[in-house]
Image (spheres, helix red, strand yellow):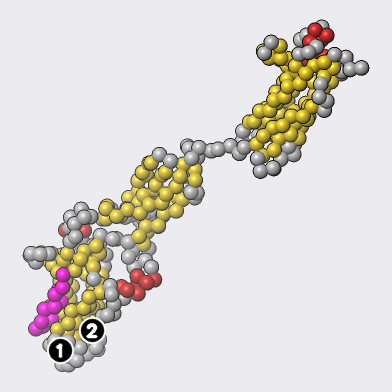
């Protein structure tokens, strides 16, 4: 932006300007090489090596190519006191021009001295300034609230005037454009509908962090005369960090390929720093199967689900039930 301001400074040899010279008394008109609609532009006029009385200069902006309409005009007076050089200001309305951004449009810029007319064809620009848009995040989940802010500046990087009643930019039109997975906040100036400024952000489903649950019994088999069976629970994220949450446990019996749970064994227990402990007692089994001797050779299963604030992960274990430990 700093470079842009330098290029637009009113220096005769600047690349963003043109200058028109007259060989008589070295009359000069210097202006930007394009005129922006609805924007005040400075036009520099000078009469070098001039002496004598005051010189009135009429500055006109005429429609192109017919020159039948004056789009804006101003006049300045060159005097000995201002060294026969001065700025005039012109501002052209956007209503005069086509809204089609593909069409290049021009105007005539004229400086009428007492005895000489300087004239140049100038390109018209619809760039009314810049709108800067910011969102509070770049990634959102569905149905979340998007907070954004914006501010507008003129081509000279000055703030756009505000409406004191609403405290919003009174020349900004706002809309939301929806694209699956990608959203845009889009703003544009009313007087320059074809030029849009936008900020992108993405909407994605939240993916739960992955963790695994491992179960390890303290003994490899359960004997029918054992008082209990303890199973160690370990839950860790895939990167190794311990999981904190709540474990839901149920023990049961596998018979003929079917699972039969022990209702009395259902437990809810804490998992802290990735560790927990579930206990199956002998009476949990006998409340469902009073004759425990009939179960010799069958398998006991344990199912554990660890629930965190962000999701759930199951763990399962199968082990055999044996005769009396002797």
* Quadrant containing the N terminus in the rendered view: bottom left
Which residue range is magenta in the image? 110-121
The answer to which of 16 and 149 lies nearer the viewer is 16
Residue 305 lies in the magenta stretch: no
Q: Is residue 112 above or below residue 148?
A: below
Residue 117 lies in the magenta stretch: yes
Identified at 38% across, 41% down, the residue is 179
Q: Is residue 3 above or below residue 214?
A: below
Residue highlighted by disc 1: 25
Identified at 66% across, 39% down, the residue is 237
Identified at 26% across, 80% down, the residue is 12
Q: Quadrant of residue 247?
A: top right
The answer to which of 275 and 315 lies nearer the viewer is 315
* Quadrant containing the C terminus in the rendered view: top right
Indicate left or right for 135 with 63 as reference: right
Q: Tag 1: Cα neighbours inside 10 Å, few (<14), some, or many (≥20)?
A: few
């Amino acid at each position: 932006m700093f470079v842009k301001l330098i290029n637009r400074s009113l220096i005769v040899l600047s690349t963003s300007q043109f200058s028109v010279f007259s060989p008589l008394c070295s009359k000069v008109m210097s202006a930007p090489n394009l005129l922006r609609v609805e924007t005040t532009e400075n036009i520099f006029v000078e009469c070098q090596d001039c002496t004598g009385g005051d010189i009135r200069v009429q500055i006109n902006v005429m429609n192109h190519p017919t020159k039948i309409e004056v789009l804006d005009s101003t006049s300045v007076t060159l005097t000995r006191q201002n060294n026969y050089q001065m700025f005039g200001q012109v501002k052209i309305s956007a209503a005069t021009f086509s809204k089609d951004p593909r069409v290049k449009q021009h105007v005539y810029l004229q400086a009428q001295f007492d005895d000489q007319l300087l004239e140049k064809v100038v390109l018209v620009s619809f760039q009314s300034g810049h709108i800067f848009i910011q969102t509070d995040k770049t990634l959102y989940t569905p149905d979340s609230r998007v907070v954004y802010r914006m501010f507008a500046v003129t081509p000279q990087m000055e703030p756009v005037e505000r409406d004191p009643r609403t405290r919003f930019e009174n020349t900004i039109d706002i809309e939301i454009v929806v694209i699956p997975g990608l959203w845009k906040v889009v703003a544009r100036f009313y007087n320059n509908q074809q030029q849009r400024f936008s900020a992108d952000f993405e909407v994605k489903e939240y993916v739960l962090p992955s963790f695994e649950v491992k179960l390890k019994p303290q003994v490899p088999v359960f004997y029918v005369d054992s008082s209990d069976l303890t199973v160690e629970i370990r839950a860790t994220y895939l990167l190794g960090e311990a999981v904190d949450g709540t474990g839901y446990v149920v023990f049961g019996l596998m018979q003929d390929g079917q699972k039969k749970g022990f209702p009395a064994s259902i437990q809810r227990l804490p998992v802290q720093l990735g560790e927990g402990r579930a206990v199956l007692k002998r009476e949990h089994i006998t409340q469902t199967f009073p004759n425990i001797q009939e179960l010799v050779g069958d398998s006991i299963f344990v199912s554990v689900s660890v629930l965190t604030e962000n999701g759930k992960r199951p763990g399962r274990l199968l082990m055999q039930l044996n005769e009396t430990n002797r």
